[in-house]
Image (cartoon, rainbow, N blue to C red):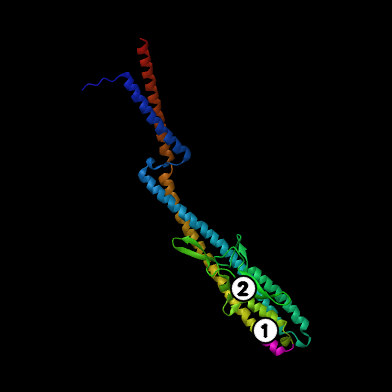
Amino acid sequence: MYMRVTAQTLASNVIANMEQQSSALATITNQVSSGIRIQSPSDDPAGWVALTQAQTTSNQLGAYSQNISDATSTLNAGTSALQNVSSILSQATQLATQGANVNTATSPSGYAALATQVNGLITQLVSAANSTSGGTYLFGGTASTTPPFQVTASDAQGDPNTVSYVGSTAPGRELIGAGQTVDTRYVGSQVFQASGADAFQALITLRNNLTDPTLTQSEASMSTALNQSLSDISAASTSVDNATAEQASSVSTLTATQSRVQALQLAANTVVGSVGGTDYTSAIVQMQSDQTALQASEDVSAKLLQTNLLSFIQ
């Protein structure tokens, strides 16, 4: 069947074609300017699925990477605090050794001076055990917003007689991978008050021994008491050193894990870029082609409009 094609029909077709070309040109221009090829599922349904999966993977790996950084920072702070505690206990060992060499005949003031120094170490120890990082306490487990150690009893002079742990019995952890966590905020009672290795009690007992009149008058009794104090301090030091080594090992593991996570994230980001990113070479060629086609349509449209106008005048 013969169909008569009018000038109006041709003009309508040209205009519709121009609208499609303008839309295509706007899309490719936006891809070039933004660097993003897929901005919605309609741009490339199959590519959108791959892009979304890659972006999800990248985001998850980014969260793991940040957690690893946070965990590393916390553990490094914890290791520093533990090294400080080790130094305090080392000083206590020296004071106990000095006490064993004091002459009991002229010793009361000497013992008192040593006891005063031990009191200072007890205060330092409480402060170190209540160390913080990023505004949270390092040795309170999951109870990281309040000091985990408190002086709950004092002697007649107001010096600490009992230090109690009031933190959590569960360690603070960071998620560093799928189903993989690392302990970052240790349970302080397990570090500083382990059975037979209570650092606070070891120093408190040492101070009390140095001020006990029944001991200061007998070299043999004082020697026995101070040797026991040295043993208690040594046990506490071992507990602290074990925690220090464990945290240092965790930091080493985190460093290796961070490298793997960052490599995987880079691979995911590469997929995001290759699937969703603009291929500038082909995009620019396409943009030039669309511009040429649109210009041609505009020329045709102009001629048709001119022809219709002449026909109308005639």
Q: Main secondary structure of the magenta part?
A: helix
Q: In this view, does 201 lie above or below 142?
A: below
Residue of label 1: 226
- Tell which of 242 and 262 is nearer to you: 242
Q: Is residue 219 magenta?
A: yes
| Image quarter of the C terminus | top left
| Number of residues whose C-alpha sits closer than 10 Å to that of mark 2, classed few (under 14), some (14–19) or many (20 or more) | some
Q: Residue, x 35% and y 13% (percent of image)?
A: 311
Q: Where is residue 75 in the image (x, y as percent from the top left)?
A: 56, 65
In-image side of 284 versus 139 (left or right): left
Disc 2 marks a residue whose amino acid type is Ser
> Residue 171 versus residue 288: which sits nearer the camera?
171
Q: In this rendering, would 199 be left or right of 25? A: right
Q: Can residue 267 be seen in this view?
A: no
Who's the residue at 33% across and 25% down the image? 13
Q: Is residue 36 above or below residue 310?
A: below
Does the rendering let one see residue 220?
yes
Residue designated by label 2 = 164
Circle 1 crowding by C-alpha within 10 Å: few under 14, some 14–19, many from 20:
many
Report, in whole angstroms, how far the alpha carbon at label 1 lies from the one at label 2: 24 Å
Residue at 71%, 73% (x, y): give it.
120
Rendered residue at 38%/22% (across/down): 301
x, y (%) of residue 213?
74, 85
Callout 1: SS: helix
Magenta stretch encompasses residue 287: no
Q: Which amino acid does label 1 sit on?
A: Leu
Residue segment shown in magenta: 217-227
Residue 119, horizontal then vertical, whole percent: 71, 75
Quarter holding the N terminus?
A: top left
Q: Quadrant of residue 295?
A: top left
